[in-house]
Amino acid sequence: MVLVIEGLVYALAPSLVERLLEAMREMPPEARRTLGLVTLVTGVTLLWIAKA
């Protein structure tokens, strides 16, 4: 499922992906780590809700 979503993003908006990656490069490592943890918690929560 992740590959389908990522593939769609790369196919439909490749320039958006480039801008997003550039913005990520400019973020300090702690901010990227926090963003990753928030994304992880969000994903687990959505899976938990979908399973219920």
Image (cartoon, grey):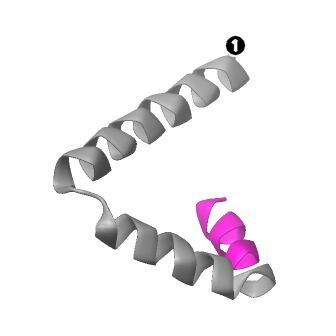
Q: Residue at x 60, y 30 (%)?
A: 47
- Relative image position of residue 46 (x, y in whole percent): 63, 28
Q: What element carries label 1?
A: loop
Q: Which residue is drawn at 71% across and 73% down?
A: 9
Q: Residue at x 70, y 69 (%)?
A: 4
Relative side of 12 to 50, left or right:
right
* Residue closest to the eye, 5 or 16: 16
Relative side of 45 to 26, left or right:
right
Relative vertical location of residue 24 with respect to residue 11 in this rendering, above or below: above
Relative vertical location of residue 10 with respect to residue 51 in this rendering, above or below: below
On whether residue 42 falls in the magenta region, the answer is: no
Q: Mark 1 points at which residue?
A: 52
Rendered image quadrant of residue 8:
bottom right
Rendered image quadrant of residue 3:
bottom right
The chief SS type of the magenta part is: helix
**Magenta-tinted stretch:** 1-10
Task: Look at the image and tell me in which quarter the C terminus lies.
Answer: top right
- Relative image position of residue 11 (x, y in whole percent): 75, 86
